[in-house]
Image (tube, helix red, strand yellow):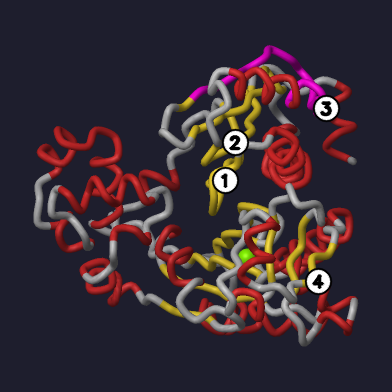
Amino acid sequence: MMTPQRKIIHVDMDAFYASVEMRDFPEYRDIPIAVGGNGPRSVLCTCNYLAREYGVRSAMPASRAKVLCPNLKIVRGRMSVYQEVSAKIREIFSRYTKIIEPLSLDEAYLDVTGCLLFNGSATLIAEDIRATIFKELQLTASAGIAPIKYLAKIASDLNKPDGQYVITPNQVSSFIDSMPLSKIPGVGKVTYKKLQDSGLAFGRDIKALDEVSLIRQFGKLGRSLWYKCHGDDNRAIVTQRIRKSVGVERTFADDIANIEELAAYMKQQLIPELKLRAKKYLSTREISKLGIKVKFKDFHQTTKEFKYHQFDEGIFNTLLEEGLARGEGKAVRLLGVHIGLGESAPTHQQFEFILE
Ligand SMILES: [Mg+2]
């Protein structure tokens, strides 16, 4: 029996932190601004579209951004405000569906297969969600609508900002044919280069190969690409494999060598995101360990973990120091934090963290 076609909406707020600042402080509305620490060693969290015209990007060192855009106004982030706004956005989502998977403070997948509003039109539901967010929060969002999760995520980027893009079930196959493989979430620069070197650039190139030779050449990645490009992403989505860990990682626009800069980025950006992502697991699972991952500029990668059953920023800091020591001063291109998920029920302290 055919499983019913799923309707997925990926909602992504436009330049989220920066947009909240522009909303709350009118003097920021017509100038290039970025959110991040102001010190010369800080890394930007995000920036508005005016700043992007100068080449400023998220995860870029403030010093480099200032060179590209000397008039850039860097404002301190107000994480608690962003979290509050994010909770309001989530509440708006919940009026349409209970199946919500947040990816970060400003991004989520919504499964609206069972939503009866607008005669079940996911296109109209997405329009209404975006209109409601704008009406109630004065912020713009973009959306991608597709029968498959990862395609919805790709689609939300296509008419950004303040737009949406629909891939109907009938369009899936042709969309994938001409889709550059670099668009697939999880295919980074390095992986893409490897694929290109083997003559694989678009979805159709993957479709032309057979599964076995792809797996032989690329292992797990090959298998996942094969399924994704055949529009059969259900495996990746529906499988209720027990998750062993949850994490957040980010590749920097420029490698960073300074430890304080890295520690500040971890504290201000990665840990709040990890807490948010971890929430849904921590109502039923305990924390089994804390960990960090560092990839140095020569792509040497290291992981440091510590068995612990609570969220503790001090431990993350220590792990970071130890991880960085292994690089002997080499600059860092990627930094990640994660927690392990144990089998047992959460402890009392964890519950306090969830309610925080
Ligand atoms: Mg966003």
Q: Which residues are magenta?
A: 302-316
Residue 250, which numbered label? 1
The quarter of the picture where residue 350 lies is top right
From the image, state whether disc 3 or disc 2 is nearer to you. Answer: 2
Q: In which of the image's four quarters is ligand 1 placed?
A: bottom right
- The residue labelled by disc 2 is 336
Residue 75 in the image: x percent, y percent?
Answer: 83, 64
Residue 144 in the image: x percent, y percent?
Answer: 50, 72
Give neighbour class at mark 2: few <14, some 14-19, many 20+ (Cα, 10 Å).
Answer: many
Residue 31 in the image: x percent, y percent?
Answer: 76, 82
Residue 249 horizontal side relative to residue 348, left or right: left
Query: Does residue 132 sit above or below 193 in this rendering?
Result: below
Label 4 close to label 2 by CB (< 8 Å): no
Residue 149, which numbered label? none
Mark 3–mark 4 Cα distance, whole angstroms, equals 30 Å
- Three-letter residue code for mark 1: Arg
Residue 20, which numbered label? 4
- The residue labelled by disc 3 is 350
Mark 1–mark 2 Cα distance, whole angstroms, equals 6 Å
Label 3 close to label 2 by CB (< 8 Å): no
Mark 2 close to ligand 1, CB under 8 Å? no
Label 3 close to label 4 by CB (< 8 Å): no
Give neighbour class at mark 4: few <14, some 14-19, many 20+ (Cα, 10 Å).
Answer: many
Give neighbour class at mark 1: few <14, some 14-19, many 20+ (Cα, 10 Å).
Answer: some
For marks 3 and 4, the one nearer the N-term is: 4
From the image, state whether disc 3 or disc 4 is nearer to you. Answer: 4
